[in-house]
Amino acid sequence: MNVYASIDLGSNTVRLLVAKKENDKLETLHSSHQITRLGKGLNAGGNLSDEAIRDTIGAIKKFKKEAAPYKPEQIWIVATSAVRRAKNQTAFIKEVFEETGLKIEVIPWHEEAKMASLGVNHALGIKGEFLLFDIGGGSTEFILCDGGEIKESVGTELGVVTLAETHIKNNPPQEYEILTLAAEVDKNIRDVKSKIPLSQECRLVGTAGTITTIAAIDMDMFPYDPLRINGHRIGRDRIEEIKNNLSGLTLKEIEDIPQIEKGREDLILPGIIIICRVMDIFGFKEMMISDYGLREGIILANI
């Protein structure tokens, strides 16, 4: 039946997609995700923590059971920034295989960028030039596309987990913490801009959890509906309004916002700052949003 499954092991979230290919289109049969914070503490110690490993293996086992009724021909597991950087990467991959029977492929950032762009193109089918950025827990990738072709890509270590752990110690964050975080983001984004020349017609497209959460807040959407997210547009002024509404709140107050999933409450503000600085430095007034990304791209790249 041409059914396939992908598991994206992100630095914050583990995500499952089960899909079938029909008439050159992926049809989602089942999707699921779980926040395991795999990259927690990685910046300080260099290793994936025992707790994060345990939670992530538990999520993979759960996803394998969820996928089983659909009888996928293949389950691909792809690991990104956290596992790329971990000193105990080999031990983690071995433990996952022993516990689940599934092999992990650790992909470099440029392969992650390529797969994310495949997923986004599949969802949106944008004609002309667009700059795609994919905000993750441990990294953010920037991909300049012209239709379905990649013209340029740049990887950064701007990740919302890393930024939150490095810069924010108070609850709610103090102004100086926000300023130092924003200064680090600025430096990285200006470096990206120097490497990616854009045309005047270029559009901005965003994907991944922070961005889709902002879209859900903008649309006052609960529960979450991925099909309504794809193609949603949001202006820079509206993003600033959301940022201002969140910046003075405690983690508990942020957690009480229905569109913000538990486990993302300390990451949403660093993520919004990345969005704002990308838009300001590159000069974009509007962003288009894609729910599709790496999970879809993993399957598309392999079939």
Image (tube, helix red, strand yellow):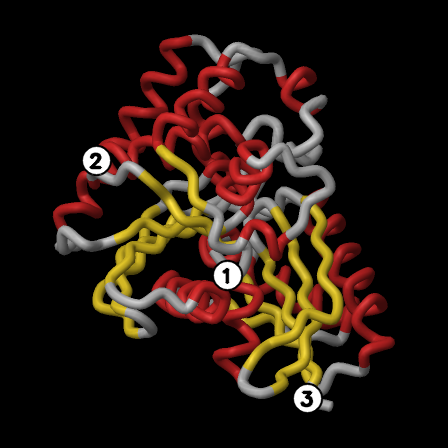
Residue 87 appears anywhere in the view: no
Q: Residue at x 80, y 82 (%)?
A: 71
Name the quarter where the N terminus is drawn: bottom right
The residue indicated by pointer 1 is: 293
| Cα–Cα gap, marks 3 and 1 | 20 Å
State the SS at label 1: loop
Pick the residue in front: 138 or 244. Answer: 244
Position in image of residue 159 (x %, y %) = 44, 41
Instruction: Count neighbours of disc 2 (C-alpha within 10 A) and say few if under 14, some if 14 to 19, many if 20 or more.
Output: few
Q: Are marks 3 and 1 in contact (CB under 8 Å)?
A: no
Tell which of 198 and 76 is nearer to you. Answer: 198
- Sequence-wise, which precedes: disc 3 or disc 2? 3
Numbered disc 2: secondary structure: helix
Residue 112 as seen in the image, left or right of residue 182: right
Whether 174 is drawn above or below 80: the answer is above
Whichever of callouts 1 and 2 sits on the residue coming sooner in the sequence is 2
Q: Which residue has dot 2 on it?
A: 281
At 62% across and 83% down in the image, what residue appears? 21
Residue type pointed to by label 2: Ile
Say whether disc 3 or disc 1 marks the residue closer to the N-terminus: 3
Q: Image quadrant of residue 244?
A: top left
Residue 182 spot, x, y in % from top left:
32, 25
Q: Quadrant of the C terminus?
A: bottom right
- Hey, what amino acid is under mark 1? Gly
How far is the residue under mark 1 from the one under mark 2? 24 Å
Q: Which residue is mark 3?
A: 2
Percent across and percent down for residue 129 are 24, 62
Distance from label 3 to label 2 (Cα)?
A: 43 Å
The numbered mark at residue 62 is none
Q: What residue do we see at 70% from left, 74% from top?
A: 102
Q: How dense is the environment of label 1, judged by Cα within 10 Å: few (below 14), some, or many (20 and up)?
A: many
Q: Circle 3 sits in a helix, a strand or a loop, which is it?
A: loop
